[in-house]
Image: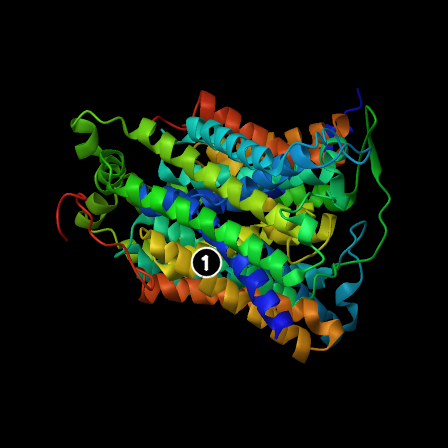
Amino acid sequence: MIGFASYAFFFLTTALSYAIICLGLNLQWGQTGLFNVGVAGFVGIGAYASALLTTPATDAHLMGWGLPIAAGWLGAMLVSGTASALIGFATLRLRSDYLAITTFGVAVTIHLIALNAQRLTGGPYGIAFIPRPFNEVADRPLLFNGLNLALVAALTFVLYIASERLVRSPWGRVLRAIREDERAAASLGKSPSLYRLQAFALGGAVMGLGGALQAHFIGFIAPDNYLSSLTFLVWTMLIIGGSGNNRGAILGGVLVWALWSASGVAIGAIVPAEQQARAAALKIVAVGVFLALALLLRPRGLIGERTVVSRHLDE
Amino acid sequence: MNLQFLADGILTGAMIGLGAIGVTLTYSILRFANFAHGEFIAWGAYLALGVASASGWLVAGAAIPIGPLSFGWGLVLALLIAMPLTGLLALALDWALFARLRDKASSITVVMASFGASMALRNLLEFLFTSRPAYFSRELQIAIRLGWGVRVTADQLALVALTAILVISLNLVLSRTQIGRSMRAVSENRALARVAGVDVDHVVRVTWLIGGALACASGVMIGLVVQIRPFMGFDMLLPLFAAAILGGIGSIPGALMGGLVVGIAEALSAATVGAEWRAAAAFVLLIGILLIRPAGLFGARE
């Protein structure tokens, strides 16, 4: 029973870390209509930044400053947000597809750097010994997993409230105005590229935080954690949950992560070991078909966007 | 400095260029960046592999190398059959997915759907054939010395010639025939073309057929020179987009030139910085062109 509760806590912790990444993506796509195909890259930047800041000094990779975990998470948001701002600066004034293509390139390049810049990132061996929150109670799994869950749940809640307030603020209204009709918004004196840049950088910072959380809960990261299948999973979460709705983003994160890990457990139990790589490939095919069907049949997702004018108006 | 990188770069550039022509055509006529285009390359290669193995199994001499080349007429036949098949695959994907989204959703939703389709198609290949690489031919080839330290194989020369034939004939079709004029009209202004009596649906079908067929040719070339893997198309995606944007969206000679620039840049970075960084060359070029001249080297400003 304790084992089960402990596992449930661990599962929810991971699911909520995905929900945080979804909140970041929702700010970019759901509110502003920016298509980021490089989610894995920005999550990876956050994970690596926090790991490099907080791990103890080592010969395996550079930095290793041994800073507190909170400093690592702030650093992750800063580095990820800055990287997003730079990419946004290069592409957001162009056609919307160019952002998709460039962010795709970011993810490929980040993976390449993580894999090959061995002096900085530890190369294919990744980074180990990332400090875990509440490590001093790690010998009591229930308490340890419970405290971690409480921490990530509190963070998710804070980010949710902040996102909701942003959505209802004048700033959020400008974002949606630009998404719906760029020319009309520009004619009212709002600079579309500036607002897009802010939303993109902020969303990137939240994704980076999500990546850093995951890195610290697992304690180990490697380049292959940050492949396009991660991007794809996060997108599926947001579309299924309901893009444009922060609750939808959280629901999608938890629900799709549950389905994803349940099918992983099922494959591990049913499929013989030598066929498991193939079964995993088929799993991604299924998610791809699922996403396409969702786009065709229910583009709003489970709980789609609600029309929000202002928090001063009743709905 | 050894000029070998130039020969390698031109060959890689030819493969990228053939794929980029499909990307640039779908981008200018259907108006979306197709992330599934890389999968047409991979599926084209596997389809050709299937036909080539079948022909080798049916007719004993099909796999015997032609002259100095490493492959037999079985592969030539396979290419001729697999090219229209890959075109049909592209058409089927358009019918099942893109066409349904095109009219009712925003263009960026179509891009997202293509991203999902690429994941599904790639992993379906991995499910069917596993990630173990396959080869068209295991013949060894002796490189020919061209002078200045440059060596090429007979296969490589044949493939560059094939690219030239394909691009020149496609350019003739687009500039001299009725369907070519219709395609250019739809890419300029879809609504106006429809009013002028152009059959837009027909143009869309021809675009997918051409894009798929050229992607297949590119996949067969990669399969011959490198190897056939489920991820071969995905790894080409960034170079394809970089080449299409570099050449200016909608321009076929531009896509080929863009492909050559990206190919040579990749070979140069492999020769100087290290082979593990070659994939970053396309990204650097892409960011550079977007910052300096987003309309591309050969394109007109929008």
Q: Depth check: B18 or A250 in front?
A: A250
- The residue located at (41%, 56%) in the rendering is A250
Q: Depth check: A131 or B151 in front?
A: A131
x and y, in percent, of residue A32 in the image: 32, 41
Residue B141's place in the image compared with A88, above or below, is below
| Amino acid under disc 1 | Gly
Q: Is residue B30 visible?
A: no
- The residue located at (54%, 30%) in the rendering is A79
Residue most extreme to the bottom: A270
Query: Which residue in the structure is indicated by mark 1?
Result: A253
The part of the image, by quadrant, that contains residue A93 is top left
x and y, in percent, of residue A164 in the image: 31, 45
* Secondary-structure class at tag 1: helix
The part of the image, by quadrant, that contains residue A106 is top right
- The residue located at (27%, 41%) in the rendering is A179
Q: Is residue A144 visible?
A: yes
x and y, in percent, of residue A170 in the image: 22, 34
